[in-house]
Amino acid sequence: MADLIGKTISHYKILEKLGEGGMGVVYKAEDTKLKRTVALKFLPPELTRDTEAKERFLREARAAAALNHSNICTIYEIDDTEDGRPFIAMEFIEGNSLKDKIKDERLKIQEVVEIALQIASGLQAAHEHGIIHRDMKCDNVMIAEKGVAKIMDFGLAKLSGRTQVTQEGTKLGTISYMSPEQTRGEKVDQRTDIWSLGVVLYEMVTGQLPFKGEYEQAVIYSILNEQPEPPSALRSDLPPALEQVILKALAKNPQERYQQATELLSALQDYQKQWESRQVQRENQTKPLPSIAVLPFTNISADPEQEYFCDGMAEEIINALTQIDGLRVVARTSAFAFKGKSEDVREIGRRLNVSAILEGSVRKAGNRIRITAQLINVADGYHLWSEKYDGNLEDIFAVQDEISQKITHKLKGKLLGEEKEKLERTPVKDLQAYQLLLKGRYFMNRMTGQDIDKGITYFRRAVERLPDFADAYAGIASAYAILGLLNYMPASTAWDKAEEAVLKALAINQNRAAAHCTLALIKLYRDWDWPGVEKELSLARQLNPHSEAIHTDYSLYYMALGKMKEALNEARQALELDPMSARTNLTMSVHLIRAGYFEEAKEQVSKLMELVPDHSYAHYLLGQIEILEKNYKGGMAHLKTALRLSGKTPLLLAALGWAYARSGNREKAQLFLKELETKARQEPVSLTFFVRVYTALQDFDKAFEYLEKAYEERDSILVGIKTEESIRELHSDPRFAALLKKMGLEDAPD
């Protein structure tokens, strides 16, 4: 049909021939009515001679024309020439086929994923309209401007009613992309397109086809009987997660493949999220700041009960140094993880990722103290500075200030006036009150209910001696907040007591970052006062810009709003400052799950388990991930371990009920639901736990009934409802949007 060039058919002026294949001839043409460039595809003559085939073509082509998707070549019109030959007018795409692109260059892994995401998205749209491509291959994907992938020839293979085989020397074309069921001539569904996309993915990654042969039957035999060479064997930089996606798409049994394009698209999106997460992490790793870990000072006094004073000495120096810009200070939890251990300072520095370590000792006898301190360079183990101080207890504040200033000078250089001012603190007027404060902190940091109560007793004794002691009131507030968060006492009681103390602390001194943090938590978990949370955290950050606790609290606030990118960024900064803290590792793990980064979440939970072996919550998180990934056997195992370690807490009873319901075992789910109800008659149980189980049982009315009750009771766990993975099915219900609106969360982006 070369003689068509220059002619006008209907309102299309033929400009040039673009190509020819088994499905006909394609021309570039001008639409003289709409003044746009189009592509005209003329179907093979045999289609015109088969009335039934032609009718089927017209019917299916009209269906394909109804597709409107950015990754599918748009069909504008279906018409006939004067002699009755059908043609399709479609979008003209300036670019190269994916096949040519693969020949010309080795695609980067991220480029492969970006193209695959677009193809999968186009397939998903077509499958939703009941259209199967049946000839998904690299030749049928065009890469247009700015890397946009466009799927060509939708429906044509299905419409033609025949198998295409294009032989070029020893290479076979379309047959190499056919699924096993398609090669056997069986009835196919959308899973055949998923197989073909798996072949395309394999080819993009390796530059080779997974199934090859010198003649058609050899290729078919390979498709039916042989496993492809692992793509990682042909490309060493292929991430295991992406290889798993490819191999699952190429499962010979259709039941073992992704069942829908939506599932494949989701798997690719999960991989993309993990990649983006790691990119953000790399971007945050700028030129290293001077960094230090302050180890707990060794007690060499005759009295072992002076331990609190040694810990307090180190903690005061940590708190002072965190206020210095351009200096990264490891948080107390991670630094104190090495207390009593005889590890080499270079190994400690490596594990904490710091350039310097401060260690020291304290001898206290009556009112006399002797303090030694040495700053050690982690790289070689040599001392950068050391000093010995002898004096009276009244000198303690001056000593702390001097040590902080000497450290800052050694690590950063000359102190600015404002930085020196930050390091100098006003001595506490009553030294006995100060020692009671240190004892209170010592016991509170041990984190058991009994020890926290003991800490509160010391804080109260401190304010009895010194009624305007803001730090002691802030300690009382922090202690009650911890009691409420860890369920050592009813949350409502804990928050009320914390608020009473924190308001006293701030009335005495507005410049206490810890007090603003505690007030932010009260406004977050009890009041749902989102602007108030932001205000208090912002004030805390101004006072102490490098505090791990502030980063963690900000991450919890952003999680409540559904701003997971910001939550992860804050959690990563907290983790950098406090890498050996169970709290920071656990918080990071939860955020990763809620953001959908399951593989990275597993890695993070593994780090948590290294820090705290047999951590029940770690097993709970791993179980949750496995269930969300539909690995029910593995997920159940972790959840049962967590249940055993936790002593059958309500959280784990609900988790197993949710898991069994998700797996389809309604009977088991109901048993755990009944056990949870029994537990609720004996002790306080969050109503949100019932919501999770009823959601998995698809009893949405009951789920919303419990959500409303939880709202009425101001259940603090509702704070995380917007990003809770276990109740995603509720999000599309108008009642969920109504609840978010009542909580003031409707405007925050997901």
Image: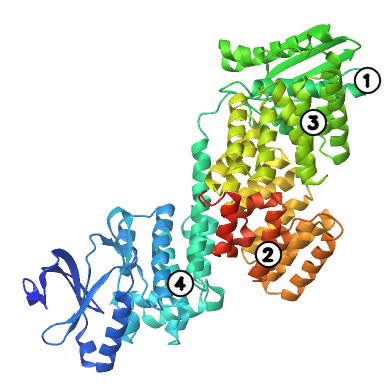
Location of the N terminus by quadrant is bottom left
* Residue identified by numbered label 4: 194
Contact between labelled residues 2 and 1, with CB atoms less than 8 Å apart: no
Residue 378 placement, left or right of 74: right
Q: Residue at x 29, y 80 (%)?
A: 61
Q: Is residue 513 above or below residue 719?
A: above
Q: State if disc 1 and disc 4 touch (CB < 8 Å).
A: no
| Image position of 302 (left or right of 243) | right
Residue 379 versus residue 661 in the image, above or below: above
**Type of residue at label 3?**
Ile
Instruction: Look at discs 3 and 1 and give the one toward the viewer.
Output: 3
Q: Is residue 167 above or below residue 639?
A: below
Q: CA distance from mark 2 to mark 4?
A: 40 Å
Q: Of 701 and 640, which appears nearest the observer?
A: 701
Q: Nearer the viewer, residue 269 or 457?
A: 457
Q: Give the Cα distance between marks 3 and 2.
A: 37 Å
Q: Which mark is residue 476?
A: 3
Mark 3 / mark 1, whichever is N-terminal = 1
Disc nearer the start of the sequence (4/1): 4
Q: Position of residue 533 (x, y in %)?
A: 61, 38
